[in-house]
Image (tube, rainbow, N blue to C red):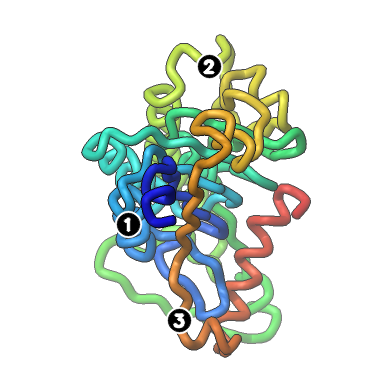
Amino acid sequence: MINRLRSRPTVSVVRLSGVIATGGSFGSNTLNDAGLASLLERAFSKGKPKAVALAINSPGGSPVQSSLIGARIRRLAAEKNIPVYAFCEDVAASGGYWLASAADEIYVDESSIIGSVGVISASFGFHEFIQKHGIERRVHTAGENKSLMDPFKPEKPEEVERLKALQKVIHQNFKRQITDRRGAKLADRDLFTGEIWVGQGAIDVGLADGIAHLVPKMKEIYGDKVNLVVRGQKRSMFQRLGIGTASDVLSAVEDRTLWAQFGL
């Protein structure tokens, strides 16, 4: 039995599901480089896998964490000379698509939501509310730009322009990632407006390579006897018990807002 198992080709399956963020609450499925580092190392090394398959379901989040995770995947793939396949589920948008672009081939479901290559910043303005309730805002800074986009002060045009300039740099980095990874596969049109596509539409513009699901596609490539080893993030004791804090509620609201952009 052991010899037969060893002779079967192994594919490591890594599930990347959740919002991409630096930190995560006890109850959230948060993706970040620190949390995924050891998992990805095992996926590319343990059991001498023939390939790594990424099962992606993410509405995005932090551009830096997206970049770090994607770079780690590419670095390990190059070091181990192992191909990477991405299988997008409900949504692989914004940072979620950044993760998918780290793969050599990207596959989607007919109803997967793909794309949203752009940068967004959302906030609220409370200055009229606090004035109405007689609340005085006191802010003291050393540096005139230290309180950029303070939600408790009226929005200033010059601060909006500064924020947009910062977003432009991040957007350029995102565009470079996709053009470097997808190259000539991309349609000759602007795909970086934040637009999203569904299933075949993503294939038509070159953001995906085909419609396929993980198990049958891996069997098609590596044979019916392929050994699929699923590797996931370890959950803390608090996550297993479902214990959270007040901050978890805010985190959950933010997570739901990201998913809701895509009707999920």
| Camera-nearest label, 3 or 1 | 1
Question: What distance separates the C-alpha of mark 3 from that of mark 1?
Answer: 19 Å
Quarter of the picture containing the C terminus is bottom right
Identify the disc placed on residue 42. 1
What residue appears at the point 44 percent right and 44 percent down from the top-left corner? Answer: 11
Q: Which residue is mark 2?
A: 186
- As helix, strand or loop, the secondary structure at mark 2 comes to loop
Which numbered marker is on residue 195? none
Q: Is residue 106 left or right of residue 110?
A: left
Mark toward the start of the polypeptide (2 vs 3): 2
x 57%, y 19%: residue: 206
Whether the residues at callouts 3 and 1 have beta carbons within 8 Å, the answer is no
Which mark's residue is nearer the viewer, 2 or 3? Answer: 3
Disc 2 crowd rating (10 Å Cα; few below 14, some 14-19, many 20+) is some
- Label 1 is placed on what type of residue? Arg
Residue beneath label 3, please? 236
Quick check: 250 above or below 226?
Answer: below
**Quadrant of residue 195 within the rendered picture:** top right
Query: Amino acid type of disc 3?
Result: Ser
Find numbered disc 1 in the image and state the secondary structure of the residue it sits on: helix
Point 56% across, 62% down: residue: 154
Question: Residue 39: image x %, image y %?
Answer: 36, 60
Residue 130: x and y, percent?
63, 79
At which x and y percent is residue 126?
63, 70
Asked whether, in this view, residue 91 is left or right of residue 145, the answer is right
Tell me the SS state at disc 3.
Answer: loop
